[in-house]
Amino acid sequence: MKSVILHIDLDAFFCAVEELDEPGLRGKAFAVGGRPEERGVVASCSYAARALGVHSAMPMSQALRQCPGLIVVSHGHGKYAEMSRRVMERLNNQAPLVEQISIDEAFIDISDIREPAEEIARKLQRQILAEVGLPSSVGVASNKLVAKIATEVGKKAARPRTDSPAPGYPFALTVVPAGSEAVFLAELPVAMLWGVGPKTEKRLAQLGIHLIGQLAVLGETALVDIFGEHGRELARHAQGKDDRAVVTERETKSISQETTFARDISDDQALEATLKELSAQVGKNLRRERLAGMTVKIKIRWPDFTTLTRQTTLATATDLDDAIYQNALELLQKVRSKGQPVRLIGVGMSGLGPPIRQMELWGQASEKAHRLQVALDALEEKYGHGVVKKGK
């Protein structure tokens, strides 16, 4: 049986959610993100703002210069997660194989459903709009690669229509029939292909290759000669081939937290307090997912935007806040001089796996610390962050 994959992408998700709360924003140029005075960036922007040159990941201060009348809306993280959950719930009701790849994006395998794929896609679009209030665009193809590109193509080609169920949004549906994948991709820029980043795109441009069809003609042998094993994957993708399955669960490979300061911070105590808070957040997330990590990492960015990372591997995996913090602090002290200003700092854990609770490995004191930490987590869940703190 041929695979049939849907890729669904919620149109300007953060903006669409904000419009549900504040209908007066509809049709206006606005951006969701951090405040410009706090070095915020654009997380999402309305299509009216996009038409004026604003785009995601742009510094908010630059967005305001580009569009002086831009309305800035602060993030509402909790409500985005809830709206995403409601959408994914409906996708899971449609098919058993749903792979959520971001807060506003998912693949759905509908190969076993005996109904035309286009009808299923259109029904889902209208259901999500009617029941959740959010517009979406969908790509339909025989594999994940082409389905996702189909969504992107549909969004870019969409024109505003007054008779659209979601005026002002693409609300696009693009179907690539099985067997026509290579033809569909041929005239598209190579940058749209998975596996083509800025460096690969630049190298291909030097070879006179700008379109996916040109890449396909070059062939696997030549691409392997140029890019090594990566060239083999490029050749398959250029022909529209992708045999990756839709997976319902993803293995967590790392857990991290970071913060960008509104102003560069040089106070040692304040920086260490931030590091401790970030370590506590990472520890709490580890315990929530019943994981422990072997490797502690820090990320630090200086005022000139130079960014570096450092890591250390532990003798025994941990999910304890203090252990994470102490190792992160040691890493920080090795790369930062006292009083040196910092723009961003982050803490992370990798080398994750199930916690090992045997007393001979953890020791009685460590096991007691873990139980205390879990108890504190439960109190915070019930009464709020910071309600109880450990004594010194």
Image (cartoon, helix red, strand yellow):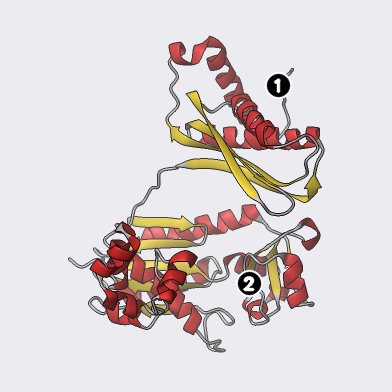
Residue 70 in the image: x percent, y percent?
75, 74
Q: Which mark is residue 346?
A: none
Looking at the image, which residue is at 73% across and 66% down? Answer: 60
Element type at marker 2? loop
Looking at the image, which residue is at 63% across and 37% down? Answer: 281
Residue 3 in the image: x percent, y percent?
24, 66
Local crowd at mark 1 within 10 Å, few (<14), some, or many (≥20)? few
Q: Is residue 191 visible?
A: yes
Looking at the image, which residue sits at the far bottom? Answer: 162
Q: Give whichever of 193, 220 is nearer the camera.
A: 220
Q: Quadrant of residue 299?
A: top right
The C terminus lies in quadrant: top right
Looking at the image, which residue is at 23% across and 69% down? Answer: 114
Mark in the foreground, 1 or 2: 2
Looking at the image, which residue sits at the far left? Answer: 1
Element type at marker 1? loop
Residue 366 in the image: x percent, y percent?
55, 16
Q: Quadrant of residue 227?
A: bottom left
Task: Calculate the distance from the C-alpha at mark 1 to the C-alpha at mark 2.
Answer: 44 Å
Q: Give whichever of 183, 249 is nearer the camera.
A: 183
Precedes in sequence: disc 1 or disc 2 = 2
Answer above or below: position of 301 versus 182: above
Q: Which residue in the structure is indicated by mark 1? A: 390
The N terminus lies in quadrant: bottom left
In-image side of 324 versus 109 (left or right): right
In-image side of 226 versus 277 (left or right): left
Q: Give whichever of 98, 246 is nearer the camera.
A: 246
Residue 11 in the image: x percent, y percent?
54, 71
Residue flagged by tag 1: what amino acid is it?
Answer: Lys
Whether pointer 1 and pointer 2 mark residues with C-beta atoms closer than 8 Å, the reply is: no
Q: Which residue in the structure is indicated by mark 2? A: 55
